[in-house]
Amino acid sequence: MQKGKISVQTENIFPIIKQFLYSDQEIFLRELVSNAVDATQKLRTLHSKGEYKGDLGDTRIEILLDEEAKTLTIRDKGIGMNEEEVMKYLNQVAFSSAQEFLDKYKDDASVIGHFGLGFYSAFMVADKVDVLTKSYRDKSQAVQWSCTGDPEYEFGEIDKAARGTDIVLHISDDSKEYLDKARIQTLLDKYCKFLPVEIQFGTKTETTYEGEGDDKETIETEVDNIVNNPNPLWKKKPNKLTDEDYKAFYKELYPYAPDPLFWIHLNIDFPFDLTGVLYFPKLNNSLEVQKNKIQLYSNQVYVTDDVKEIVPEFLMLLHGVIDSPDIPLNVSRSYLQADTNVKKITNYITKKVADKLNSLFKADREAYEAKWDDIGVFVKYGLVSEEKFGEKAVKFSLLKDTDKKYYTIEEYKENISESQKDKYDKVVAIYANNTEEQHSYIKSVQDYGYNVILFDHMIDNHYMQHLESKHSDMTFVRVDSETADKLVQKDETKESVLSEKEQEKVKTLFTETLGAGTFVDLRPLSPSDHPVLITKPEFMRRMKEMQMMQGMDMSMLPDNHNVVVNTNHPLIATKLLKMRSAEKKTEFTKYLYMLAKLNQKMLTGEEMSNFIEKSIDFLQEG
C-alpha cells in the first residue's frame, strides 16, 4: 500500500469544506448516492452506445449499515474507476489554496455531479473513508483509496471481482446518529426518493393475508427495501397518464392529504429544460402559505423545498414537484443563484397556471364555480401580487354573492350598474364579511333590491382595493358602512312620517343623550328596518383593518361610527315621541343605541352588563 498527499497547499482543507461548502451535514448521503447514480447511468449510456459490451446485470445501488463496525457503505455497480481516475478525481482537486478553492467553486453550478467535489462531503460525518473501486474496462485492476480527513491518503491494489465502487464511511463519534437505521431511512426518503436508479437499503417485512374470516392467515415476508421510485410521474408523457395516476402520485408525495382539486403537468425543453407537476390542494379558504410543499429537483436529485426564488409567493400555495437541470445552484445545492433562467422559469410557471385556470373556467364553468371556495384565495392572492397573472386572472376571478351566485368582475359590474350607483355615478358593490353577524344589515339592503357579495377572507381587503385601482368607475362598501346606507336612500320618494319639528326633537334627544361628539343622522328608512343603526366610515374602517393585519396596535384609534335613526320605525315615530317623562325618553334613547351597538358586536364589559340589566327591567315593566 503506497502513501501520498492530496495536492492542496493548505494543511487541512476539510474543516473549511465543512464550514463554508457543506454547512448542512446530512446532505453527505445525497452527494454520495448521487455520485453512485451518475456512475451507474454513465455505464448504461456506454452500454446503449455499444461502447460497453459486457452484461449490465443488476445495477441496483445498495446502502449497507453495520452498526457494530460503525460503517455506512454506498455500493454501486456502475462505471468504476481505475488507478489513474482515482488519482485524478480524489487526489488532484486542482486548486492551490483553500481560499482559491472556495472562490472558484462555491458558486459554480457546473461542478455539480463531479465525483471528487461531492465526495468530500463524506468527511463531515466520517473520520475515515475507504474507496474500493474497479473500472468497467476489461482487465482493470481494482484499487483502494483511504483517507482520514487530512491531506494524507493510502492507496493500493486490492481483489474485487465486481465492477463499480464501494464508499465505506467510518462514522465518527460525533456523528453516531448516522449509524441509526431509522435516521438513514429518513434521509433516503428525503433526498433519494426519486433518483433514477433503484436503491436498496436492507430488507423490510411485507405483510399479506390469505383466507377469510376465522381462517384468515397473516403471512410476513422479508423483501428487499427499495427506497425510491426511479420513474416518477413527472418524467412520463402526460398523454399516457390518467387522473388516477396523478392522484396516486399526490398520495406518494403527501400520504395524509385529501385529493387535490386539479393539477398542471409542466413539460418544456426550450428555452430551458423543466418538467414537473403542480397540484392545487384544498385550501379551505385558508391563506396560510404552506411553505415547503413544492419540492425542487435537478435531474431527479432532491435539492430543496425552499423554492421562493423560482416560484412567486402566491404559487407557494401549490403542492408538487419541479425538476430542472437549468436552475443554477451553488455547489452544495443549498440555495439558488440569481440567473436569467430563473426569471424565465418563474414567468413560464405563472403563465401555465393562469392558462390552466382559464381553460377550466371556459370548459366547465359550473365545475369551476364549485371549486371556487377552495381556489378563490389563491386566484385573488395572485391577482393582487403578480401583475402578469392578474392580467389573465381578471377573466376567471369570481365574485360570489350571499345567494351563492357567481359573477366575473365585468358581469357583476353590468348586473348592478343600473341599480347601485352613488352620487358620483360610481358603481357601488356592497359586501358582507360575516353573514351571521351582519344579517340584519344584509336583509335591510336586500329588501331594497340590492345585491350583496361575500368577502369573508383576509385577502379580500387587498383584493377590493386592487379592483378599485383597476376599475376607477367602481367602489366597494361594506353592508354596514355609511355609504351603503346612503345608497339605500337614493329612492327620494320615501318620506318620513314625522314632521320637521318632530324630527328636530328626535335629533336633539339623541344628540344630547349620546353626547355632542356623536354624529346623528335621521333617515326615513322602511318600518321593517331597525329603529337605530350604526354605520362605519368605509375608509377609516378599512385603514384600521389593514393596520391590524400588519400587527399594529389599534387600541389608540377611535372606533368611528355614525348613528342612523330610522324616523319611520314605530319605536321612534310613536313610542319615543309620546313618552312624557324626559328621564324615560333618555333611558329609551340610550337603550336603542345600545341595541344598535349590540348588533355591531360593539357592546362589551360593563356596557354589556348594564344593557342586560336594563333589558330585564324593561321586561319586568311590561
Image: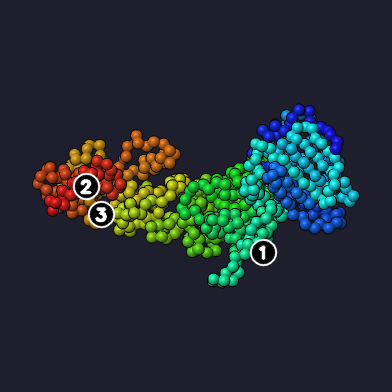
Q: Identify whether 260 is placed above or below 542.
A: below
For the point 40% across and 48% down, which residue is it?
475
Disc number lying in front (3 or 1): 1
Residue 137 picture location, percent across and down: 87, 50
Residue 157 picture location, percent across and down: 86, 42
Residue 51 visible at all: yes
Disc number lying in front (1 or 2): 2
Q: Amino acid at mark 1?
A: Lys
Residue 542 picture location, percent across and down: 39, 43
From the image, tell me which residue sits under label 3. 529
Q: With 422 as the anchor, is 225 left or right in this view?
A: right
Colour theme: rainbow
Secondary structure beneath disc 2?
helix
From the image, tell me which residue sits under label 1. 240
Give me the C-alpha separation between circle 3 and circle 2: 23 Å
Q: Amino acid at mark 3?
A: Asp
For the point 37% across and 48% down, which residue is it?
477
